[in-house]
Amino acid sequence: MNDSTKNYLQLVSTIDDYTRAIDISPDQRDRFIATVRRSRKIIVTGTGTSLPTAQYLADRLRRQFPEKPVYFLPTGKAIREIDHLESDDLVIIISYGLNRADSLIMLNKAIDRCAVVTLSGNPELDLGDNQNIVIPPDREKIFCRPISPLTTLMAIEYLCGGTKSASGVIDSVGIHEDLCRWIDPKKQTIILYTAGVSYAAELWGIVLREGAGMNVSTKDVENYSHGYYGPDTAHLGDRQYIILTSDSREDTRDLDRAKGLYSIDNFNSYIVVAKGDTYQANAQLFREATEVVSRILVDTGYDMYGPNGMDNNRRYHEYEHFTDY
């Protein structure tokens, strides 16, 4: 077993310790909400494994502040949009290490133009009058960070008016052992998702691609079933489908409408159902992604720092080599 796999398994084994360590005070939450309220326009951005939590935060803010224009933008678009912001706008950057070139470029641009809030694992970041909300673990040093997405999701829910879990523990969906016996790492994997768990599906896609080295794509289950696209490809023997859904009324309805797709002969699918409201369902699936990858890694021995991992694009992520925006 390579060192990166050992590090990954060790981190996953301590996931409950990190989720219990989330420490956001009521004053920090009040300050965050006050900043959002006084902002004219809000840009939420993230990249890599922070992308799903950034999307979730943008959606959460849209529902909480329907009068506010809130946009989720991926890195490249956000970097360019910041050039057009005004002093009463707000940029929220989710970046677990806050050490990648793209995150630092966005931060350096935004801090000179408007208000900035960061959600990061960097407790030493000094933003002056702006706010850095620290999410454990501090500077999680592993490619495809397995714990930060879950702790960030929990922190977002509290910042946006939810309550802190008494134990700080999110239950696993409990399917990882059966799923890992079923899944073939050599096959192309398509993750189909219902709308309520689209953020979790994005994370599953990232961690299976970058964490386990699998060929994975994600698609909306209902859109995928329209026409003949889905049923035709369902007959191909080199593909397998993981269907992520929750037990909410809306997600159950979406899945029921697509039943004709995954009841086709030879449609090799595994359905994962998370329980509870949108937050709880996403939190369970966020956690399950780490468990699935940890078990797949034992079988595949994939090295996240190997030729297809961080070493191959480290120069891109280093700020001193990539500042021309």
Image: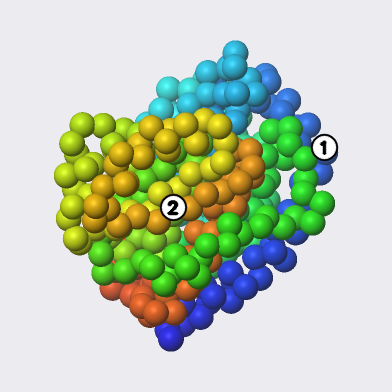
- Say which mark, if any, is on residue 175: none
Picture mark count: 2
Badge 2: residue crowd in 10 Å (few <14, some 14–19, many ≥20): some
* Residue 136 visible: no
Question: What residue did someone put label 2 on?
Answer: 271
Which residue corresponds to the image point at 36% horizontal and 78% vertical from the top-left? 300
Q: Where is residue 264 shown, x and y percent of the image?
A: 26, 47
> Looking at the figure, which quarter contains the N terminus?
bottom left
Q: In this view, does 12 lie above or below 253?
A: below
Q: Nearer the viewer, residue 238 or 83?
A: 238
Q: How crowded is mark 1: few (under 14 residues within 10 Å), some or many (20 or more)?
A: few
Amino acid under disc 2: Ile
Q: What element carries label 2?
A: strand
Task: Name the quadrant containing residue 130.
Answer: top right
Percent position (x, y) of residue 192?
37, 45
Q: Nearer the viewer, residue 196 or 101?
A: 196
Q: Callout 1, which amino acid?
A: Asp
Quick check: 277 left or right of 49? right
Would you name the residue on which mark 1 appears?
Answer: 27
Q: Is residue 78 left or right of residue 267?
A: right
